[in-house]
């Protein structure tokens, strides 16, 4: 189902054309209201009960389970992708001489932890690039063999907007007893993803892009087979029975059930978590399948406009519905972003490409302004 323009749900002035959700999303009005209510609650701490430290976290886990076809107990609350990757890396023991597969020009938060782990384990990192006529998925599948111990991948490449077939990759990874760790920050909430279909070992996601949530919040998914590991920090809420404040000094080494043991400290952020809940509720109301279908239509319209001005996607892999990555000509001006922003049009410049990433707030006026702006620049 195509979703009609939802601009009224966001505080985006009519004079602004915002095509940069892959950089950072605006917050929905309901999310802003929920965050303000959370701040008001913290301003009156006598209204905060013991249940407030736990109930909202559990609702968020349930929302993520609905969003990804998983179980609520499989999710930990984290602050960032780097935090989640650090948790994962702490719990991996890779064979010496094994291979870690990454994509060329992968986002750094999904690179640095594996460089460190490779150095400690004596493993080798392989950066993959498609050969001529090959897709990113084909390149990954061709590289998996019996020496592969870990694949650390995105669902959507953050520069090119290429979408990987994670179901096929997950199947071959398991056949070769390799671990599959995913960063879904540039896709979850805009592109369909199913834990049941992909069966990753872990995934992490930051909330501030396609989940339409606040900065410094995110989630770690750990498959049930990986829920017996060590947390990155010793958070009191991650211990069994921590709901009973009166007995907190009855220290225990028993951890909370599921992936809760991996929660960050001070997870019960009374301002940010209500905002996260509101954004996830909005996504679930729209339906990710409907969002993806609608964004594919919007990016197709933007691609048609870009083609009028000599800009093409130039991608051999299937393009994710939420991304339009345009190859820049050799003689492109160096101040593209400055010219675009002077016209109140916002997108990103990554490498030799313009990254155009809209959401459901785009209207006909935005399309017209994008056309005019590209015409003036190119």
Image (cartoon, rainbow, N blue to C red):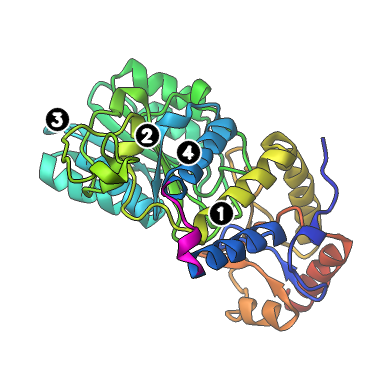
Residue at mark 3: 95
Residue at mark 4: 58
Structural distance between the alpha carbons of marks 1 and 3:
42 Å
Q: State the mark number for residue 202.
A: 2
Q: State the mark number for residue 274.
A: 1
Residue 166: percent from the left, percent from the top? 49, 30
Viewed as shown, does residue 249 lie left or right of 108?
left
Residue 103 placement: quadrant: top left
Structural distance between the alpha carbons of marks 2 and 3:
19 Å
Nearest to the eye among marks 1 and 3: give it. Answer: 1
Residue 111: percent from the left, percent from the top? 32, 51
Q: Counting other residues with Cα less than 10 Å from the Cα at mark 1, is it few (<14), some (14-19), or many (20 or more)?
A: many
Residues rendered magenta in the picture = 44-50
Closer to the chain start, of discs 4 and 2, is 4
Viewed as shown, does residue 147 lie left or right of 190?
left
Q: Counting other residues with Cα less than 10 Å from the Cα at mark 3, is it few (<14), some (14-19), or many (20 or more)?
A: some
Q: Residue at x 23, y 47 (%)?
A: 232
Closer to us: 318 or 298: 298
């Amino acid at each position: 189902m195509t979703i009609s323009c939802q601009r009224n749900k966001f505080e985006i002035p009519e004079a602004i054309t915002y095509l940069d959700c892959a950089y950072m999303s605006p917050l929905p009005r309901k999310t802003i209201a929920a965050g303000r209510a959370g701040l008001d609650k913290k301003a009156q701490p006598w209204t905060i009960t013991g249940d407030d430290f736990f109930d909202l976290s559990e609702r968020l886990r349930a929302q993520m389970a609905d969003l990804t076809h998983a179980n609520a107990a499989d999710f930990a609350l984290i602050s960032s992708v780097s935090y989640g990757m650090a948790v994962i890396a702490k719990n991996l023991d890779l064979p010496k001489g094994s291979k870690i597969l990454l994509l060329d020009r992968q986002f750094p938060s999904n690179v640095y932890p594996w460089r460190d782990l490779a150095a400690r384990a004596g493993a080798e990192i392989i950066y993959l690039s498609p050969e001529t006529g090959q897709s990113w998925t084909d390149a990954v599948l061709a590289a998996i063999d019996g020496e592969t111990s870990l694949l650390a991948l995105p669902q959507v490449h953050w520069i090119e907007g290429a979408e990987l077939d994670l179901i096929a990759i997950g199947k071959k990874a398991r056949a070769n007893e390799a671990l599959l760790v995913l960063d879904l920050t540039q896709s979850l909430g805009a592109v369909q993803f199913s834990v049941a279909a992909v069966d990753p070992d872990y995934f992490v996601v930051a909330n501030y892009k396609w989940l339409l949530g606040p900065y410094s919040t995110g989630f770690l998914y750990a498959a049930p087979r990986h829920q017996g590991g060590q947390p990155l920090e010793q958070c009191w809420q991650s211990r069994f029975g921590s709901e009973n404040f009166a007995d907190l000094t009855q220290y225990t080494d028993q951890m909370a059930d599921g992936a809760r043991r991996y929660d960050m400290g001070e997870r019960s952020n009374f301002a940010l978590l209500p905002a996260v809940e509101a954004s996830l509720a909005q996504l679930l109301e729209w339906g990710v399948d409907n969002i993806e279908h609608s964004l594919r239509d919007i990016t197709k319209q933007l691609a048609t406009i870009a083609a009028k001005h000599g800009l093409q996607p130039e991608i051999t892999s299937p393009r994710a519905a939420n991304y339009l990555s345009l190859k820049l000509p050799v003689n492109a001006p160096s101040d593209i972003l400055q010219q675009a922003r002077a016209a109140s049009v916002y997108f990103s410049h990554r490498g030799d490409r313009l990254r155009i990433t809209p959401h459901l707030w785009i209207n006909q006026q935005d399309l017209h302004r994008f056309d005019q702006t590209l015409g003036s620049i190119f």
